Amino acid sequence: MTVAASLARTAGFAALFVLATVAGRMTVLDATSLSLVWPAAGVAVLWFCAQRESPAMWVDVLSLAVITVFVNTATGATFAQAAVFVVSNLLQVWVFVALVVRWRPDLWTLGPAGGLRRLRDLWVMLVGAFAAAATGAAVGPTAMWLITGRYSVITTAVWMARNIAGVLLVGIIGLCLARVAVRSTRSAAPSTWRKVEYLAVSVCSVLAYVVAFGRDESLPVAATLISLTVWAASRLSTTYVALHTGAVATIAVLFTLHGQGPFAVVPAHAGRALLVQLFVVIVVVVGLALALGRDEREQLLAELAEEKEQAARRAQLTRAIIDSMADGVSVVDSTGRVSLRNPAAVHLLGGRISPGEVALNSAHYGVFHLDGTPLSAEELPYLRVLAGESVDDLDLLVRNDGVPDGRVVQVRATAVPEPDGGRSAVLVYHDVTAERRQRDELASFAGVVAHDLLNPLSAVDGWSDAAHEALRDAPTAPAVEQARSALVRVLRASSRMRGLINDLLAYTTARDGSIAPVAVDLTAVVADIAAARTDAAVAAVEPVPLFGYGALEPLQADRVLLRQLLDNLIGNAIKYTAPDVVPEITLTTTRRGGEVTLSVTDNGIGIPAGQHERIFGSFHRAHVDTGYTGTGLGLAICKRIVERHGGTITAADNPAGGSRFTLTLPAALDLDYAPPAQRAGDASQVPGR
């Protein structure tokens, strides 16, 4: 805010304050210099709330003080009394501004969040007005007592009541008029019938108050007049309610001061003024409470309608997206009712839909296992999910009248909560027929090629061995030694090629072969592998590896693939050991719920830095230049086997030297779980140690 704009505001509010102060001084009681009404209190709080960020606030303070002294002394007050009024007014304004701006900082702004908008705003105004008036009443009447030597409780009560009424009435009217001025260009004009209702309320209110307060005899009708305020607050705008209360309050105060109306029975001016001020406060609070409560309800209903419309648009967009998906999507609730199904789901199931939107058995849809056996009721994906199982990438065969040649569909099912506490199953169907056919063809091709390659490779090995035997008894000569060296290279290359072919076949099996998880005694599998590796080392006159393992947790896994997994890891640990170092392999397990963590630790040469994740890639060899042979498929096979069982595998360095592989695999389902007992003597079972 610029200084010029601030001074212009100061001039405008100062003019209003002059008028309000003069109007209040015209209601001074005889010989008391106490005004019965004080609209200047409301103008003052409007003034200083609007100017609270003014760069020239001192001008506003000085203007209020000068106007208060001038008007009060000009209307019969002494300079001392005027000085008391200045101090009291400034303290009152400061308390109100400090409290209200702290509790509701946007109340005095003209932005979207400003102005009286909620019922809470009225209570903030009321509490702020009461606290401010109490501060003024604590200073003003006390100082007047010191000046005049007279103190009256009723005078103090009138001081408080008039200031509360002035702050509430004028402050609220000012806020409402400011909002109307800002929104006038955006507000829709009321309808004709609403204009008639405005006119009817206005005419009825004026007539009723004039009749009730304009009679010399007092009638007990003040309470009934509030019904007009209730009418206005229930039907008409909040700004009109504020103006309506201001108008009827003015009528009530003017007639009461002249000894007319329901409160004229009180002989004392102070008591009569106190009653009418309390009546004004009640009318203001009742009218604004009803009007603001109605505005809040209408705002909430409008927001609810907008949210409902947005939700409908989002639902429509979501449905359009789902309907446009190439993958099928269907939702089955806890009662078996199909609550959603997109066109792709109908197409993938060969056009078979559920009659009555109730999911039926697999025979109705023509859904089978890949081997052609039908699914039992317990194997239906949505029932498995609702029973708490996990269904991920389940391949099923769909064959019915709509798909006579059959279609392979991959199903993924997920459970989602329902509002009533139940669960629904969300099923996603993906057509993998072409992928499956290509994969099967590729696997078949790889198997045939590998098989066909092994035949000539066997012939190469056989003839190479025969040639090597024939040259064994040949006399030593340079040509013979060269032939023997060439045959050794041929046999070595043949061995590498055989290993590569075997690894390719193993990788294909690990990737594409079906798995049959059963409960497997991991301790027995490890013991069998350890015995085989020990025998092989003894036969090859190599260092016999040392194996350390206790009672290992049983697993739910494919027995063949699990053995291949462990054999690969143990074989790597033995192979990648420094010369003249006895390989040591330790295996431990821990179980948590339905998952077992298996740790395989060795004392080998370790994994080069930065390659702990890359070693699981196909054909990746971490030790290319160290003389260790291999195809780079061993750990890729391990990773694929673990992932097909729904687990994970990671590699890390062994702090004591070597490597540590950590695997997570499913725990056995049909074996009772008990913590593994440590075997007597040592924490390790060491075949051959």
Image: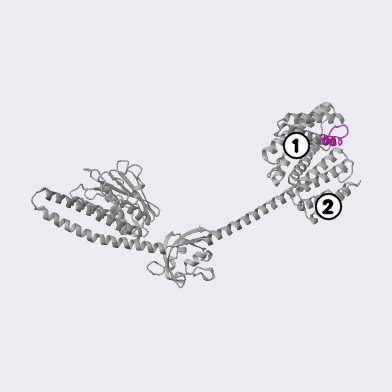
Left or right of 508 in this view: 353: right
Furthest-right residue in this view: 216
Number of callouts: 2
Find disc 1 in the rendering and name its residue.
45
> From what the image shows, is residue 61 above or below residue 189?
above
Image position, residue 255 (x, y; %): 88, 43
Disc 2 on helix, strand or loop? Answer: helix
Query: Foreground residue, 440 or 615?
Result: 440
Q: What is the span of residues highlighted in magenta in the rendered image?
A: 18-34
Asked if residue 25 lies in the magenta stretch, the reply is: yes
Please provide percent x and percent y for residue 196. 82, 55
Q: Residue at x 10, y 48 (%)?
A: 477
Q: Nearer the viewer, residue 504 or 131?
A: 504
For label 1, the crowd category at 10 Å Cα-Cα, with few meaning under 14, some 14 to 19 and many 20 or more, is many
User: The N terminus is located in which quarter?
Assistant: top right
Does residue 520 appear in this view? Answer: no
Residue 605, given in percent of the width and then of the height, sits at 28, 43
Q: Is residue 265 left or right of residue 164?
A: right
Query: Which residue is more in the foreground, 306 or 316?
Result: 316
Answer with the quarter of the image where residue 40 lies.
top right
Q: Earlier in the sequence, mark 2 or mark 1?
A: 1
Question: Residue at label 2?
Answer: 199
Question: Is residue 587 visible in the rendered structure shown here?
Answer: yes
Up/down of 36 relative to 195, above or below: above
Dot 1 falls on a residue whose secondary structure is helix
- Toward the bottom, the furthest residue is 401
Which label lies toward us, 2 or 1?
A: 2
Specify the amino acid type for callout 1.
Answer: Val
Mark 2, Cα crowd under 10 Å, few <14 / some 14-19 / many 20+, is few
> Of the residues shown, which amino acid type is indicated by label 2?
Leu
Label 2 to label 1: alpha-carbon separation: 31 Å
586 lies left or right of 407: left
